[in-house]
Image (spheres, rainbow, N blue to C red):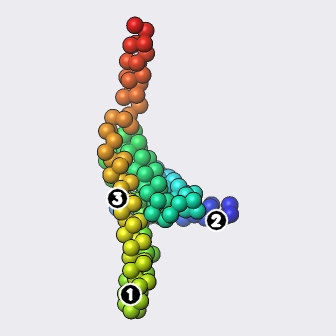
Amino acid sequence: MTGFVLVNMFCSFLGTIAFSVLFNVPRRFYFCCGLTGMAGWLCYLASENIASIATSTFLGTVLVVLMSRMLAVWMKCPITVFLVPGIFPLIPGAGVYYTVYNLVQGSLREAAVRGIEALKIAFAIVLGIVFIVTIPKQWFSLSYWRRRLRGASENSDL
């Protein structure tokens, strides 16, 4: 089991970095992009046995988008630098492939099952992105929370 997890960590990390290179992400962000993709994939793997594939993908996407938002604010760069490469391990590429394969082979029932599953996963990715992107940007800034806590402590002295 441990070997399986380590191989998945390594492959998702390297795969995400490869997509970062492909999308011309600046070199200084490669490591953070790799961590983002790896964290999302590990969240997916951890919840895969407990929940459905679409729910696991949703949870992995939420983690990827949260990390992307935090890193974007802290490193002062666009969120897409981390989000686009980080989401790639969760994309249902095999599901779409098998949908088309079964269509070509004439197995319409199996193609429909695979296609619906791929659409559920894609919809889970979209929902995960939308839920987190609607959170205001300043919530991911440490200075915002310091000001709020400082204001709360001053008001409690009254």
> Crowdedness of circle 2 by 10 Å Cα count: few (<14), some, many (20+)?
few
In the picture, the quarter occupied by the C terminus is: top left
The three-letter amino acid code for the residue at tag 1 is Leu
Q: Is residue 39 above or below residue 158?
A: below
Q: Which residue is mark 1?
A: 108
Q: Is residue 30 left or right of residue 133?
A: right
| Residue sitting at x 43%, y 15% | 153
Secondary structure under the numbered disc 1 in the rendered image: helix
The three-letter amino acid code for the residue at tag 3 is Val
Residue 96 visible at all: no
| Residue sitting at x 36%, y 28% | 144
Residue sitting farthest toward the bottom: 106
Residue 145, quarter of the rendered image = top left
Q: CA distance from mark 3 to mark 1?
A: 26 Å
Q: Which residue is mark 3?
A: 126
> Crowdedness of circle 3 by 10 Å Cα count: few (<14), some, many (20+)?
some
- Circle 1 or circle 2, nearest the eye: 1
Secondary structure under the numbered disc 2 in the rendered image: helix
Q: Which residue is mark 2?
A: 4
Q: CA distance from mark 2 to mark 3?
A: 28 Å
